[in-house]
Image: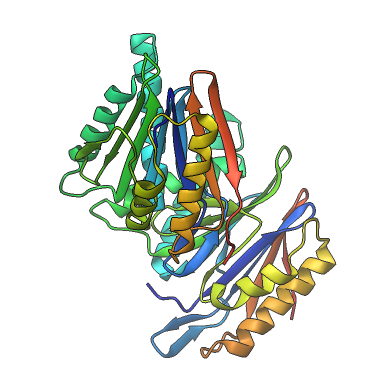
Amino acid sequence: MSMLDSIFGFVGKDFVICAADSTNARSVVVMKDDLDKIKVLDDHKILAMAGEVNSIADLSEYVQKNVMLYSLRTSISLSTAAVANFMRGVIAKAIRSRGGAFQTNMILAGYDEADGPSVYFLDYLGTLHKLNYTAQGLAPLFVMSTMDRHWKEGMDVDEAIQLVKMCISEVRKRVLVQQFKYTVKIVDKDGIRVLDVE
Amino acid sequence: MSGDGCVAIASDTRLGQQYQTIAMDVPRMFKMHDRLFLGLTGLYTDTQTLYNLFKFKLSMYKMREGREISPETFANLVSSTLYEKRFGPYFTEPIVVGLDKDNKPYLCGMDLLGALACEPDFVTLGTSTEMLLGACETFYRENMNEDQLFEVVSQTLMMATDRDCLSGWGGVVHIISKEGITTKTIKTRQD
């Protein structure tokens, strides 16, 4: 699996924030620098993905469509926890199937009326865990220590953006592979917003 | 580990991918009913898959039979479920721990294919299994009461996981007795 992507996310006071680099590279060649690796599942859920681009498209569309189908059929919109467990099932089934595993690790972030903001770690094997902050791809090597030090319970949006900036500059400073741009998205009770942190 | 009319199960709380720690609040033991625990070491996705599967199977068993499953029957259920996947196994080594209807401790470990290894005194599995085994051999005594059992199990877990770079970062101990379940978290080295 290509490990050149960097994604990370964390919970704030009443929102979740996710960042992903937007580089799509094959071998040593950069194909494009505006790939959105943070997929939108519904009004209050985003999925940041690191890995093979085909798996990213395949899995995110499959999940997004199924979440939509469920809500159309039942008039119930799924919670972040429900979607996380649904995805875990899909991924865990895939690793032992003929088609093979989805070659992608991801972070699911969402905001629920009942449970508030949440971030889930989900890897290509189907390991699911709820966390306050996490990273996937190249990012954890560099930003986990930054977040260990600077993440606090109940951060507001400004503090969160500061932390995202710190993490991005840490990656830029230390990673050999150039990561040109970052996509940053935030989810709160009003929905999903794209932030420009540059 | 068994005691006098009580039995304990303990695990560390680290979740990691090789040398990267993902979380430090993940005990790998699951309460199946008031007198039965299942511990699942190994690949965490399989731990989660199997826990969901056994939760389902036990709900079906309870509805069909109108009673809770006995530890021995459950161990055999786990074993046969694992052997079903003989040529594409779940990468997990389970422990079944419980009290039977006479309040006698039941302990059983197995490998990833479901080969049962039932012991009267203690069973150890996971990355620090050898170190745990040594500590258990040293500290185990017969007919310990609940408090003594807790002390021995905690010390054993701490000794073993502190010397294993892949485990540690906290621990949880459950003690099952006829009065109920006591759960205690233990602080260990955080590095």
Quadrant of the image containing the N terminus of chain B: top left
Quadrant of the image containing the C terminus of chain B: bottom right
Q: Residue at x 71, y 71 (%)?
A: A149
Q: Is residue B35 above or below residue A38?
A: above
Instruction: Tell me if B37 is positioned left or right of B85 in this view.
Output: right
Q: Is residue A139 above or below residue B103?
A: below
Q: Residue at x 23, y 35 (%)?
A: B79
* Quarter assignment of residue A71: top right
Tally of numbered tags: 0
Instruction: Tell me if A96 is positioned left or right of B150 in this view.
Output: left
* Quarter assignment of residue A108: bottom right
| Colour pattern | rainbow
Residue B177 image position (x, y, % from top left): 49, 23
Q: Nearer the viewer, residue B189 or B141?
A: B141
* Quarter assignment of residue A171: bottom right
Q: Nearer the viewer, residue A75 or B189?
A: B189
Residue B67 image position (x, y, % from top left): 39, 11
Q: Residue at x 48, y 43 (%)?
A: B152
Residue B35 image position (x, y, % from top left): 44, 23
> From this viewpoint, which residue is outermost toward the left?
B87
Residue B102 image position (x, y, % from top left): 37, 14
> From this viewpoint, which residue is outermost toward the top?
B66
Instruction: Tell me if A63 is positioned left or right of A13 in this view.
Output: left
Q: Nearer the viewer, residue A150 or A76?
A: A150
Q: Is residue B77 above or below residue B151?
A: above
Residue B88, visible in the rendered structure: yes
Instruction: Tell me if B40 is positioned left or right of A144 in this view.
Output: left
Residue A92, visible in the rendered structure: no
